Image (cartoon, rainbow, N blue to C red):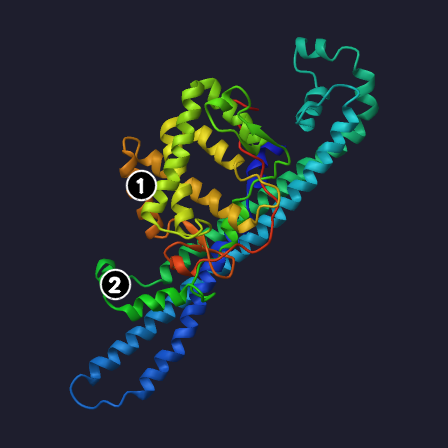
Amino acid sequence: MTYRSDVAYIEKMQPHLVDAAAEDFRRVVRLIDSALPVLEEARGRVEWAGEGRELLDRRLKEADMLLEALRNGYDKAAAALDDYVTAQHQAKRLVGEGVRTEATLGDLIRHIEDPGSEPMKKWDDLRGTQGFFDWLGELGKGDDIDKVRAQADRLFNQASDAYERAKRTESEARDVAVRMLQSARAILPDFLADSSAAQAIIGGVPALQEEIYQAANDPNARRPGDTILRQYQVADDPNSEVFPGAPLNWFVDGREVRASEAALLRELQDRYGLLGLKKFQEIHDEAFEVADQRFGSDDRNDDHNDAFRHAYWNARLTQEFGEDWTRRFTTAHESIPGNQAAREAMDLYNNEVGRSIALANPDASPKELADKVQEAVQQGRTVVIGGDGQLRFSDQIRPEDTGEPADVTLPGHPQPKKPTDS
């Protein structure tokens, strides 16, 4: 028999993330397709006789072969992931079918005994006797069990079959996808490039730098932002309150926050007292000050200053109060009703970057943390908002070219709970 717990991993799957990877592969194919005509045109324009012509022809042929191999490999990889995305959706639908059937089973046997969250396992226990104590526990329930046995067995088997088909669908598709990806990898040519030399050339040629910035606006040359946009959303908290109230607001400035933020600040107060709240405020002010020093900004919103500030704020809070509390608080901080999706995703994503930097550098001083965060912003490990209102990696756009988020909201995920919460 296959139970819901056996396919819990399928319920947690996020096919849109796999689809984003497939889109990355398709993007490479489109880039290569756009380059092939240029290469052909260059070959047609060359009029060269004498020494070096044979070498040129050989290099052009090698370039053709390289691009063709790259195109075929990435095209095959994209197709593999496309098929796996379809299978994931189908498997999730089958799990949903099983969950609904199992819920009906739970309703059917509820008058006999509360099935809890796993009606199938409860019915499996009720319909069979496993020793004296099991018999004793089911004493007096025999007639009720017999009355629903046929219908309950049918629902049990239907749910189990749906779960089994979901498991088989996903497993078989995954095996095929892995084989196809391995085959695609074998097609890709092995070639080496000196990345440090390439960076030096790009850095010394303004026209190449300009080309990089322009490429960030090309849908074929940028990583899709939809993955981050949808993944980094939190459910709205409709309630707000002023924290702290009297008499603490004599010592710490009170301000309106979401109710979930206030609850977490009270948790901080319980653990660290008034000094903890003062330290929290100091880190908040410090984040703004250091961000202004590292990335000057007119309005501090949606740009590199904003990206640095959120990442550094989270890094410092993680150092002082731990990753768990910091993650929960800074997530609650974004639960503002009507918060634009791109801005919310930007802040949540950059918050996570900052926490990861702190965890990777537990002994770093505040200045060393700031250096690490600044490096992350410059290397594009954080995100900002482009002039079109969409997310961009921070190395793909100049600070002066950032913009405001599109006026779009998205449903959010529940706020993270304490590790001890059920």
The N terminus - image quarter: top right
Q: Alpha carbon of mark 2 to alpha carbon of mark 1: how far?
A: 24 Å
Q: Earlier in the sequence, mark 2 or mark 1?
A: 2
Secondary-structure class at tag 2: helix
Residue 419, can we see it?
no
Q: Nearer the viewer, residue 299 or 287?
A: 299
What type is the residue that disc 2 sits on? Gly
Residue 37: quarter of image: bottom left
Near mark 1 (Cα within 10 A), the count class, few <14, some 14-19 or many ≥20, is many
Residue at the image point whose x is 42% and y is 74% from the top: 34
Q: Which mark is residue 157?
A: none
Residue 413: quarter of image: top right
The answer to whether residue 55 is above or below residue 317 is: below
Q: Nearer the viewer, residue 353 or 7?
A: 353
The C terminus - image quarter: top right
Residue 181: quarter of image: bottom left
The answer to whether residue 48 is above or below residue 347 is: below
- Look at discs 2 and 1 and give the one toward the viewer: 1
Q: Position of residue 62 (x, y in %)?
A: 28, 74
| Residue under pointer 2 | 203
Residue at the image point whose x is 39% and y is 27% from the top: 279
Q: Is residue 147 left or right of residue 337?
A: right
Residue at the image point whose x is 58% and y is 44% from the top: 168
Secondary-structure class at tag 1: helix
Q: Nearer the viewer, residue 14 or 264?
A: 264
What type is the residue that disc 1 sits on? Ala
- The count of marks equals 2
Q: Answer yes or no: do the residues labelled 2 and 1 have beta carbons within 8 Å?
A: no
| Residue under pointer 1 | 370
Q: Position of residue 104 (x, y in %)?
A: 76, 33
Q: Is residue 232 left or right of residue 198?
A: right
Q: Position of residue 389 (x, y in %)?
A: 52, 58
